Image: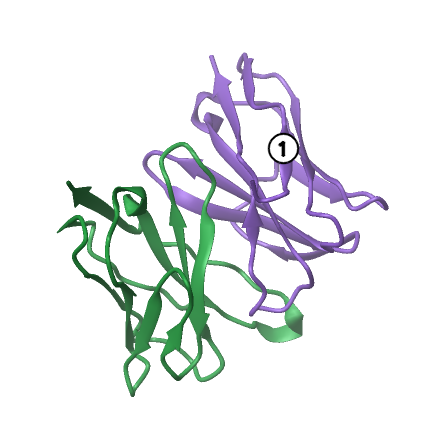
Chain colours: A purple, B green
């Protein structure tokens, strides 16, 4: 158990819908990272927040957005869903935002878009 | 973004050492080399990281080439629980303190009993 929690574990929805994925980092961790893992693309970095502020963006679509709240939990919002958005979404946390920091990954949310 | 190249898959026998290679020929001087692994149906987990010198921890050893263009993750005695996808990534400190993490496809390690 990494100490990072993600809800829900599974999510099934239809094309065009909007969903919110939630992540609670390890106690004391200030950084939250979001990743998308699909079968053909591997693990893709989406976005990084540190203490409520966006730090870096990766391959995140404009239909996707994220935020980190004052209590440090984070939400990833996915809208106008397409079939290709079906994937595992992982959240990770680290103590700070140094590139030497270890990232602790949550168990993931499996999103299925029908 | 600096990239890594790993073999798609490797196979090992239980109780034998495993050497997982990673090429990163475009590595810059301040890039750290990190290894993570992903067990089936789980999120990735940290294995080890290093900059220039070889590193050891309870999970593995990391051997870094003198020119830093390649590295090798060493599992000294593979167990069935080590069967996973192993990712070699470079932690690149980009301008302004932001960073785009680049994971490759990783190496799928199969451990035979």
Could you say whether the residue bearing mark 1 is in a helix, strand or loop? strand
Q: Nearer the viewer, residue B64 or B6?
A: B64
Judging from the image, mark 1 belongs to the subunit labelled A
Q: Tell me the quadrant of the picture where the C terminus of chain B can be found.
A: top left
Residue at 23% from the left image edge and 47% from the top image edge? B109
Question: Could you say where residue A80 lies in the image, as x and y percent from the top left?
Answer: 60, 23
Q: Tell me the quadrant of the picture where the N terminus of chain B can be found.
A: bottom left
**Picture mark count:** 1
Q: Residues within 10 Å of mark 1 (few under 14, many from 20)?
A: many
B2 vs A70, left or right, is: left
Question: Could you say where residue A42 lies in the image, as x and y percent from the top left?
Answer: 37, 43
- Is residue B64 positioned above or below A13 on the image? below
Q: Is residue B79 visible?
A: yes
A102 vs A7, left or right, is: left
- Reading the image, the residue beneath label 1 is A6
- Is residue B92 positioned above or below A114 on the image? below
- Is residue A75 positioned above or below A71 on the image? above
Residue at 33% from the left image edge and 81% from the top image edge? B68
Q: Nearer the viewer, residue B88 or A12?
A: B88
Image quadrant assignment for residue B96: bottom right
Q: Residue furthest front?
A: B15
Question: Could you say where residue B27 lies in the image, as x and y percent from the top left?
Answer: 38, 76
Q: Is residue B33 visible?
A: no
Residue at 20% from the left image edge and 44% from the top image edge? B110
Question: Could you say where residue A4 lies in the image, as x and y percent from the top left?
Answer: 63, 41
């Amino acid at each position: 158990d990494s100490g990072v929690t993600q809800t829900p574990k599974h999510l099934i929805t239809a094309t065009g819908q909007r969903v919110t994925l939630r992540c609670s980092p390890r106690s004391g961790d200030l950084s939250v990272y979001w990743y998308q893992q699909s079968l053909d693309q591997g693990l893709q970095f989406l976005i990084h927040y540190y203490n409520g502020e966006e730090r870096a963006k990766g391959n995140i679509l404009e239909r996707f957005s994220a935020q980190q709240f004052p209590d440090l939990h984070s939400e990833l919002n996915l809208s106008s869903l397409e079939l290709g958005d079906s994937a595992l979404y992982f959240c990770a946390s680290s103590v700070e935002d140094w590139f030497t920091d270890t990232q602790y990954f949550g168990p993931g949310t499996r999103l299925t878009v029908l | 973004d600096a990239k890594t190249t790993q073999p798609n898959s490797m196979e090992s026998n239980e109780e034998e050492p495993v050497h997982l290679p990673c090429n990163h020929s475009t590595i810059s001087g301040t890039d750290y080399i990190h290894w993570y692994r992903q067990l089936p149906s789980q999120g990735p987990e940290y294995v080890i990281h290093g900059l220039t010198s070889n590193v050891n921890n309870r999970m593995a050893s990391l051997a870094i080439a003198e020119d830093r263009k390649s590295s090798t993750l060493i599992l000294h005695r593979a167990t069935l629980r080590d069967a996973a996808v192993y990712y070699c990534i470079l932690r690149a400190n980009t301008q302004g303190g932001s960073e785009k993490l680049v994971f490759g496809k990783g190496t799928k390690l199969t451990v035979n009993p």
